[in-house]
Image (cartoon, rainbow, N blue to C red):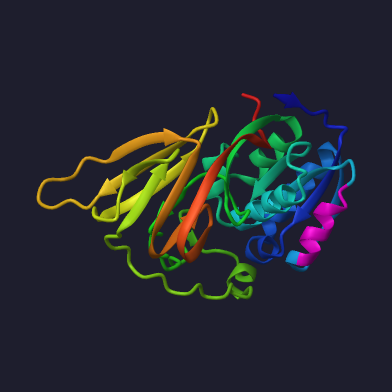
Amino acid sequence: MATFATSEQLLVIIDPAARQRDGESVRIAKDVLSAGAAAKVCLPDGPEEFARALGRRGSRRPVVVGDGHALVRAVTLLHRARELAGCALSVVPVGDTRLAEALGVPGGAVAAARAVLDGAERRLDLLVDDSDGVVLSGLGIPPEPVRAASAAEPVTVSSGRPWYRSLVRTLAPRPPRLPAIPAPGPSRLRVEVDGETVVDLGQPVEAVSVTPGPGGLARVEVRPLSVGAEATPVRVSGRTISVAGADFRYRADAGVSGPVRRRTWRVAEGAWGLVLPSA
């Protein structure tokens, strides 16, 4: 693990969706980072400016303030520029924090920003597919249906009165509605791990999941369709995973891809560095 001095220069890239969704958490993260390090703050208006800022970071260590989509975008850009090996990435999750938390990043803005300043780099395995896409935490076939956003939940304060999310957040432009994803059903897939067939097209499956690392191996779980008694999942590990079948979709990290008829993922051991709490 590589540790970092707080005097190191940072490039703080604040994703536009984070600014719209939770400006208060963005402000807190920016204040903590600016107080603890020489931080240059960048406010890109879209993916192109985001990519341009990351590409011009120079010797500054990049910090992404945003959700899982922003983190995947940053890793993808660095991977395709072949710059992952020499870049330790940091993230302060704002919005959907599930991907960052699954990777070990604290969910709160203050704790995550402190980890950026005081944490250490950990090298993590990466799944890279045959279209040069990346998977950080795992993928699932078929993707689970997208759940509708829940209503604002009340937060109880000391007076006992319920308060709802800020008016600014309520009035902020809503992100575009995602296309509907059909409810998952049995699929006929051929799953191969390191050239060996785990399940073939003749056996319907309910789900396939692939999780990278550690140690250069991906964990693969195949759940056959159960008829009557529950079928036992098949679990194997390997470095190369190929899935083939009639037009299937898959969820990788924070997004859904497909339909495709075949996709192959390989494990890139220790391919990227993420700054995590030292403890």
- Residue 107 lies left or right of residue 192; in this view the side is right
Residue nearer the viewer, 39 or 132: 132
When asked about the image quadrant of residue 201, the answer is: bottom left
User: Can you give x and y, in whole percent of width and height, for residue 161 in the image?
Assistant: 47, 59
Looking at the image, the residue that sits furthest to the left is 228
Residue, far front: 195
Q: Does the magenta stretch include residue 42?
A: no
Which residue is rendered at x = 57% and y = 53% of the image?
Answer: 130
- Bounds of the magenta span? 48-57
* Residue 21 x/y as whole percent: 63, 64
Quadrant in the picture for the N terminus: top right
Magenta stretch: helix, strand or loop mostly: helix
Whether residue 153 appears in this view of the structure is no
In the picture, measured across the screen, residue 244 lies left or right of residue 257, that is left
Relative to 118, say whether 97 is above or below.
below
- Which of 195 and 45 lies nearest the eye of the viewer? 195
